[in-house]
Amino acid sequence: MASDEFHALAERMAAAPPPPPDETVEQQRARIDATMSQLPLADGVEAVETTVGGVAAIECRPGDLAPDAPVVLYVHGGGFRIASALAYRAYTSHLAAVIDARVVSIDYRLAPEHAFPAALDDTVAAYVSLLDEGVPAGRIVVAGDSAGGGLAASLVPAARQRGLALPAGTVCCSPWVDLTVTAASYVQNADVDRLFSAESASLAAGLYLAGHDPTDPLASPVFADWAGAPPMLIQVGDVEVLLDDALRLAATASDAGVDVTLTVAPEMPHIWPMSYPAFPEAVEAVEEIAAFVHRVTSP
């Protein structure tokens, strides 16, 4: 059963006024950035605007970071259309603090202005930039949530296609990895998932793909060949419409021999770790990410 702290936060969020129904995507982006950028950073962590591989980013790092600390390349969610590194700045600062890592959160190009494969190209460019900087692939973990979780997963087949060294691991939180939007959990969890739906997924997928085949493994990594891929941590709530996406990714990768850790959290909503440290389940999820990062990057 979910904690009292989680239920209290959920009640406060449910009581908040909904956004205007006629809000444009530009207004939505501005509102999210303005609201989420006000959240405080983790103590002792600095957040600096930078550029990696020509992609704007925010880098978070603790003040006493070791030279050989892990590097997390973070890819934000938002249905390929909204959110930013600024909106995720507080969360990635907490990741940096808990993991004791350098966390580089990228501002990949967004749809509908920039359709597939722009977001993935930017993710790969940022990864290549870290490699060119001299960071060993074995010290890099690629992480993301929702659409960003799909991009983090897609980086693996994209890197293999380009002949790049693969990262040490991948973290996918509430990942959207099947853009056909046909999973049964879209129907089964429709009444309990207040953050995502088949309708919003279909709209976002259409704008992102712009007519491209949704079964392309670089767009929907559930269709990728996962043989030889690095370890993967997948976190998903059991009330999400994306539950089946996560389960199918875990099964497909496991069947290919990948070391997969799958956590299905009871009653947890879409991307609940982002609420760290507001309730115990979010704390547990971030601590699990930290433990995974250190396990796969340890010599």
Image (cartoon, rainbow, N blue to C red):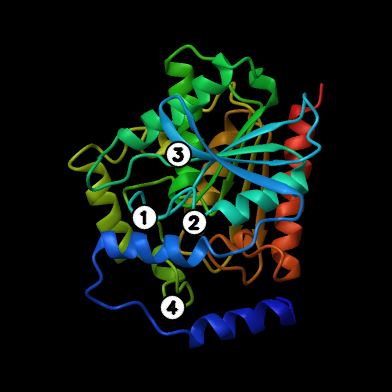
Considering only order in the chain, which callout, 2 or 3, is on the residue closer to the N terminus?
2
Q: CA distance from mark 4 to mark 3?
A: 27 Å
Circle 2 sits on which residue? 87
Q: Is residue 271 visible?
A: yes
Which of the two marks, 2 or 4, is nearer to us in this view? 2
Q: CA distance from mark 4 to mark 1?
A: 24 Å
Relative to residue 288, is residue 134 drawn left or right? left
Contact between marks 1 and 2 (CB within 8 A): the answer is no
Circle 1 sits on which residue? 82
Contact between marks 4 and 1 (CB within 8 A): the answer is no
Q: CA distance from mark 1 to mark 3?
A: 14 Å
Q: CA distance from mark 3 to mark 2?
A: 18 Å
Circle 3 sits on which residue? 151
Viewer-proximal residue, 242 or 13?
13
Considering only order in the chain, which callout, 2 or 1, is on the residue closer to the N terminus?
1
Amino acid type shown at disc 4: Asp
The residue lying at 48 percent from left, 18 percent from top is: 160
Circle 4 sits on which residue? 191
Contact between marks 1 and 3 (CB within 8 A): the answer is no
Considering only order in the chain, which callout, 3 or 1, is on the residue closer to the N terminus?
1
Q: Secondary structure at mark 4?
A: loop
Relative to residue 11, is residue 108 drawn left or right? left
